Image: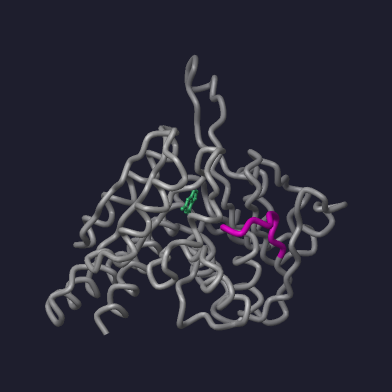
Amino acid sequence: MSRVIDGKAVAATVIDKVKASSADLQAAAGVKPGLAVIIVGDDPASHAYVGAKGRMAKECGFTSVQHTLPADTGQAELMALVATLNEDAAIHGILVQLPLPGHLDSDAVTQAVLPEKDVDGLHVVNAGKIATGDLDSGLLSCTPAGSMVLVREIHGKDLSGLNALVIGRSNLFGKPMALLLLAANATVTIAHSRTRDIAALARNADILVAAVGRPQMVKADWVKPGATIIDVGINRIDAPEKGEGKTRLVGDVAYDECAAVAGAITPVPGGVGPMTIAMLMANTVIAACRAAG
Ligand code: GUN
């Protein structure tokens, strides 16, 4: 059986450090980190994530502001809110929860957030810094940064000689994850919906990262024995075994069968998820420290 990578426990150590930095900043400079989250529409899963982010921000001693806008909010109104938050000195981090309703231009909104307040790491300035190997002066996208912390738990900082496969090529996760693995000296392949034989690529991967949003897609015969699996998927599926109408959360990896082959694996829930929130808090305190000089 493989080692289970306990994202909850690792996230708790990150959060402890964030709380300490937040308290230090307040004591030394009188600055309280401020995080603003914008959510448009009423998707229940998005509201659950945003609620968890707000609660954690408060627990870290931050000012936490949530802007809940109706699903029919116009582009101009949303852009105006981002502009107001950009100018608000009490707000150090701005997160626009994705996906936005289809009539809104997500790119325009994410690029309107000031790079120094872009705690999601989605602005081209922050994405470009990762791409050029500057992992220090910008803000790293939260889920890839959190996933890297979990990879380091198993392999340490230097991934020289290891093959990594990232399944998924989104700007939010797959691309920055591949770049972070590359910066750590892994040999990186990105697979996606147009890739011919993902299973064959996966069988060659010492580090297998799945972020496709397809429940239990990665099977045991895709997994190289002893590999480290990072499962970024969060999918809700029917669970008739729990009773009629019940559901449960699963990742993009068929957990039980893959755990039997892998060397280490992240569970869902309790793996990457808690790390995303922890890294968001870390980015917010970093942004606040920089703003305080
Ligand atoms: N929706 C799902 N994950 C994320 C995330 O990390 N950031 C934002 N803004 N929206 C998301």
Please indicate, yes or no, whether residue 33 appears anywhere in the rendered image.
yes
Please indicate, yes or no, whether residue 10 appears anywhere in the rendered image.
no
The image's colouring method is one colour
* Stretch of the chain drawn in magenta: 165-172
Furthest residue to the top? 244
**Residue 184 magenta-highlighted:** no
As rendered, which of 110 and 27 lies closer to the eye?
A: 110
Taking the spot 27% from the left edge, 85% from the top edge, the residue there is: 293
Q: Is residue 87 above or below residue 76?
A: below
Residue 97 placement (x, y as % from top left): 44, 48
As rendered, which of 71 and 83 lies closer to the eye?
A: 83
Q: Which quadrant of the figure has residue 202?
A: bottom right
As rendered, which of 68 and 4 lies closer to the eye?
A: 68
Residue 109 placement (x, y as % from top left): 48, 55
**Residue 171 magenta-highlighted:** yes
Residue 100 placement, left or right of 213 = left
Taking the spot 81% from the left edge, 59% from the top edge, the residue there is: 201
Q: Is residue 120 above or below residue 179?
A: above
Residue 176 placement (x, y as % from top left): 60, 67
Our reading of the magenta stretch's main secondary structure is loop
Q: Is residue 152 above or below residue 39?
A: below
Taking the spot 66% from the left edge, 81% from the top edge, the residue there is: 185
As rendered, which of 18 and 223 lies closer to the eye?
A: 18
